[in-house]
Amino acid sequence: PRTYSHPTSPPPPRPSFGIAFDIDGVIIGGRAPIGGSPQAIQRLYARDGTLRIPFLFLTNGGGIPESKRASELSKLLGVNISPQQVVQGHTPFRELLNRFEDDPIVAVGKGDPATVMSEYGFKKVRSIDEYATYFPDIDPLAPFKPWVMNETCNKKHASKIVHPSYDVYSDRVKGVFVISDPVDWSRDIQVLCDILRTGGLPGAEKGDQPALYFASDDLEYQAAFPAERLGMGAFRIALESIYNTVNDSPLKYTSYGKPNPFVFKNAEAVLTKIVSTMHQHKEMTNGGLANSFSTLYMVGDNPKVDINGARKAGRPWFSVLTRTGVFKGKNNHAQFPADLVVDTVEEAVDCILRKEG
Ligand code: G3P
Ligand code: MG
């Protein structure tokens, strides 16, 4: 007898391209969507709401956990974004867990930096806001800052302590992590100089500098104000020049974020995992996930950061520069020319989808 095999429909083809979107100056300006971003992102989903085209957000910003950012973006853009699709400047700080898991650390920046580090698994974390409250008079300008004098504000910080932390008067701070843009520069520069010069114990004699990490080194970025705003890189310059003036040995630090090529390598690996999730199976080759991207698009607004980074990362990266943020020029950027220049993210997605057929 003849045997018949059941006809099975072939699996949908794996997309051979993926997209990384910068957030500030491309997707949002301040807090509001820009450049038709909801429409652009919605095109990457099927009618039933499932992901059709692999993409992620690759931002140098941060300050809140990836899961919270994912739900904020979902609301703003009207689609379901998973935490896996959000790579922030500080996301790779997770990899430093082995080194600092049980060490006292200080987390700096807007948002909820201590919660970010606690969720990564660090056990002894204090935000600089909370840390500073244990040292009366550490900031001589505090009496002139109405928000510091506000009692409820201090109580709010105290209630955010998630883990039993460390004794700030005897346990030396081993690492400082600048998670997001610092809010009170004058206090933060003062307190960081204290921590860094004394080996992690403000008021003590000089000691070895604790490790210092910045989530990014953006000099400027696009927020809601029409002209660019000073970013974490500007804060780094301020801290470094003051520290190097008051201290004998120069400041040692490591900066993460775009344009470092490892950020793009990591984004490629995350996009590969996203494709596997979309297709609900994992393809293993030589112990790793199969990589099938012929093109990865970086859609950004900052030539020095986004375009420079994609260029340095090389193939399969293809850079797309929008005019909704830091770059406002007519033609291409002279020093860091993009592979494609468009007005908005909506136009970027349109061009990509047409190009990919
Ligand atoms: O503070 C955020 C800023 O430095 C850059 O964000 O999304 O443009 O990489 P983004
Ligand atoms: Mg940007």
Image (spheres, helix red, strand yellow):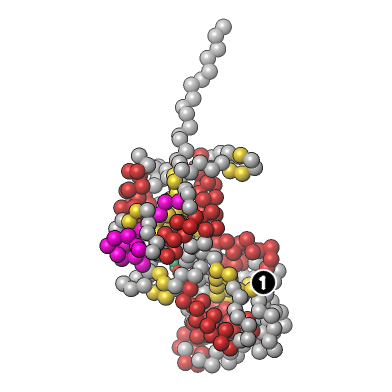
Rendering coords of residue 331 (x, y %): 29, 60
Residue 33 seen in this snapshot:
no
Query: In which quadrant is the C terminus drawn?
Result: top left
Instruction: Identify residue for label 1.
Output: 124
How far across and down, in percent of the image, does residue 356 sit? 37, 42
Up-down: is 282 above or below 271? Answer: above
Quarter of image, res 136: bottom right
Residue 167: image quadrant is bottom right
Q: Is mark 1 within 8 Å of ligand 1?
A: no
Question: Does residue 246 appear in this view?
Answer: yes
Callout 1 amino acid: Lys
Q: Residue furthest left?
A: 330
Viewer-closest of 354 and 203:
354
Quarter of the N terminus within the rendering? top right
Residue 105, position in %: x, y?
64, 74
Foreground pick, 156 / 79: 79
Drawn side of residue 31 relative to residue 285, left or right: left
- The residue drawn where x is 42% and y is 75% is 230
Residue 244, above or below 100: below
Magenta stretch, main secondary structure, is loop
* Residue farthest toward the front in the current orientation of the protein: 335
Q: Could you say where residue 96 lies in the image, as x and y percent from the top left?
A: 64, 64
Q: Residue at x 32, y 48 (%)?
A: 350
Q: Which residue is at the far top?
A: 1
The magenta span reads 317-334
Crowding at dot 1, Cα within 10 Å, few <14 / some 14-19 / many 20+, comes out as many
Look at 35% across and 50% down and name the residue there.
349
Dividing the picture into quarters, in which one does residue 179 lie? Answer: bottom right
Residue found 55% across the figure and 9% down from its top: 2
Q: Tell whether position 59 is magenta.
A: no
